[in-house]
Amino acid sequence: MPAAPARLSAAQWLICVIAAIGFAFDIYELLMLPLILRPALAELGGIAPGTPEFARWLGLMFYVPAFAGGIFGLLGGYLTDRLGRRRVLTWSILLYAFSAFAAGYSTSLGMLLFFRTTTFIGVCIEFVAAVAWLAELFDDPKQREKVLGYTQAFSSIGGLLVAIANSLMIMYSAKLPGIVLPEFLNLGVVKDAHAAWRYTLMSGLIPAIPLIIIRPFLPESPKWAQKKAAGTLRRPSIAELFSKDLRGTTIVTTLMFACSYGVAFGAIQQIPQIVPGINAVQAEIKEKSAGKPADAQKKIAGVTIQQKAAEYTKAQEVGGLVGRFALAIIVVWFASRRTLLRVFVGPGLIAMPLIFLAFAGGQESTFFTMDISMIPGMHNFSVSTLGIAIFFAGFFTVAQFSFWGNYLPHAYPMHLRGTGESFAANIGGRMIGTSFAALTPLVAGMSFVPGGSPAAKFAYVAAGIATTLFAMNFILSFFLPEPKHFGDE
């Protein structure tokens, strides 16, 4: 019988904890934007949903940070191979944490865009460094696969936490100290010093706190450090990613990563734009606004839409969390990576068009409701048809991200690990995949798109994008190379 894998050492536990925190707040930082964008655009630019200006800034806020993140993320992957996993991971987390905090002080759309860009750059670099670090920490293959799977599951916990944090800020931001910029900075005046969206952004500082405490106790990747000390670590090269042996891996993984991210940003992350068209949301706004003046009605509508968007985000992230754990459990059962991926892509190809067509209809039926208002940030918990639908959308889509975190470290040799992961994740996922966040509102604004409201149009476009990209990933899975053993693991 094979020997049982050794128990994790204190250093390994510390690395897993920091990586899990990094993964959690990667998604925490990214999923802030759909939750805060509507009120932020309204305050900073007076931009109303459904207008061409709103669509333009929606695309800019999603895609400009992603594009910059892709470029700098590729550089970060190269530096991960050159300078080490620990150093790059540490600075990337500090970058996105302090950038998110600074974004809460934004006095203009340009300032918000700048700090969202630096936040995204940190996130793009962190993922690559953390995955490479974890992959080189464990000798036992099954233990390594499980660690990669379970630590990445914290990404969905991060998504759930940001939805809860946003709900808390909506409820209590008026009671918090006002946000004020020092006059000597000459950056303008914060209009709404108690805006919930500002406090939601500033909560992104949290991961920097444990990192600063734990950082002195974190070791470098032992395998990378050993090769570096011995002088046998080869210099990374982007050109080598397209050598005869690696060309197929690089091209296919980049395209498939783009499809996975395209579904997330072009469909699932458009839920806040779809929420206003749901019958239950419209009914709740009407009930709360009855007899109120116009300004109060507008504010009630905005808050209600934010709260409902946060609730759907929670359902999607719970689905993603279950999907990530499901992959972490079954990953050791599959010798073929292609077959493992199809476990999620195949059913998703059938489910995704049905899910978003249901959202286009806007008819929500509640199965049951439970009072959990005693939990901070939570209201009455209800299970509805659309809530279940977005749960499965998250399940089939988000599990693919964990798949790539398990697959990519074994697809490239050690000296190219960070660079190869970064090319697929940042060029494919962040630069190409997230461009669908700009494509969806662009297409949804065209006259030929069916739907009687902007919300319905968003849902129909999301259905088309999700179906197309799932189909592409299913086809491409037949060309996905099985990972090779490079003799350095």
Image (cartoon, helix red, strand yellow):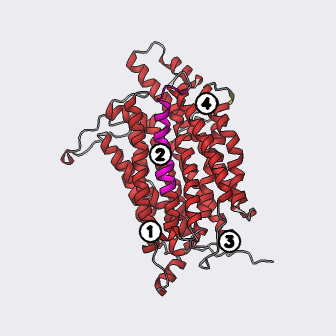
Q: Position of residue 138 (x, y in %)?
A: 62, 73
Q: Nearer the viewer, mark 4 or mark 2?
A: 2
Q: Look at mark 1 in the image and give the residue it sits on.
A: 78
Q: Earlier in the sequence, mark 4 or mark 2?
A: 4
Q: Say which residue label 4 marks.
A: 359
How many residues crowd mark 1 within 10 Å: few (<14), some (14–19), many (20+)? many
The magenta span reads: 427-449
Q: Which mark is residue 141?
A: 3
At label 4, counting other C-alpha atoms closer than 10 Å, the crowd grade (few under 14, some 14-19, many 20 or more) is: many
Residue 101: within the magenta?
no
Q: Earlier in the sequence, mark 2 or mark 1?
A: 1
Q: Nearer the viewer, mark 3 or mark 2?
A: 2
Q: Secondary structure at mark 2?
A: helix
**Do the residues under discs 3 and 1 have CB atoms within 8 angstroms?**
no
Nearest the camera: 228 or 425? 425
Left or right: 139 with respect to 241? Answer: right
Q: Which mark is residue 351?
A: none
Q: CA distance from mark 4 to mark 2?
A: 22 Å
The reply to whether callout 4 and callout 2 are in contact (CB within 8 Å) is no
**Tag nearer the camera, 3 or 1:** 1
How far is disc 3 from disc 2 in space, using C-alphas? 35 Å
